[in-house]
Image (cartoon, rainbow, N blue to C red):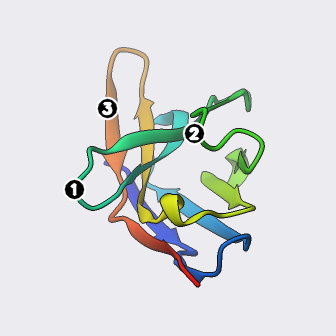
Amino acid sequence: QVQLVESGGGLVQPGGSLRLSCAASGSGFSINVMGWYRQAPGKQRELVATITSDSRPTYADSVKGRFTISRENAKNTVYLQMNSLKPEDTAVYYCNVDYGGRWWRKESWGQGTQVTVSA
């Protein structure tokens, strides 16, 4: 079972930056796609960005050009660098990891970290 620990959320002014981190721990599996999702109050959880094991990223249109996802495979860690933050980026951000072995796959979610963009 993968354990995920997120960090890096907080309060920031519009136009500011934050960097989220998510470290995965455990053994006996390979980590495949890692990603970030977010959920604003009263809204459904939505995809922000994902990154494959060979570091190919995808982004939601709403964050393209402002957010950058990256990963360090040696540390089983995924990052989300968020620049030019807007009030509409305010949400709880969740890390998601797809992992498994040769014949099985599972996914795990982090506990969530609050990001608030406000003046």
Residue type at numbered disc 2: Ala
**Mark seen at residue 42:** 1
**Mark seen at residue 65:** none
Q: Secondary structure at mark 3?
A: strand
Q: Give above or below for 1 relative to 18.
A: above
Left or right of 55: which side holds 49? left
Query: Looking at this rendering, what residue extends furthest in the front direction?
Result: 119
Q: Residue at x 32, y 21 (%)?
A: 104
Q: Residue at x 57, y 39 (%)?
A: 49
Residue type at numbered disc 3: Lys
Q: Give above or below for 96 relative to 32.
A: below
Residue type at numbered disc 1: Gly
Q: Is residue 28 visible?
A: no
**In the picture, residue 52 is in which quadrant?**
top right
Mark with earlier residue (1, 3): 1
List x then y, in percent, for residue 106: 31, 32
Left or right of 105: which side holds 115? right
List x then y, in percent, for residue 16: 73, 74
Mark with earlier residue (1, 2): 1
Distance from the alpha carbon under mark 1 to that under mark 2: 21 Å
List x then y, in percent, for residue 55: 73, 32
Distance from the alpha carbon under mark 1 to that under mark 3: 28 Å
Q: Give above or below for 24 relative to 16.
A: above
Q: Nearer the viewer, mark 1 or mark 3?
A: 1
Residue carrying label 3: 106
Q: Secondary structure at mark 2?
A: strand
Q: Secondary structure at mark 1?
A: loop
Q: Nearer the viewer, mark 1 or mark 2?
A: 1
Residue carrying label 2: 49
**In the picture, residue 56 is in which quadrant?**
top right
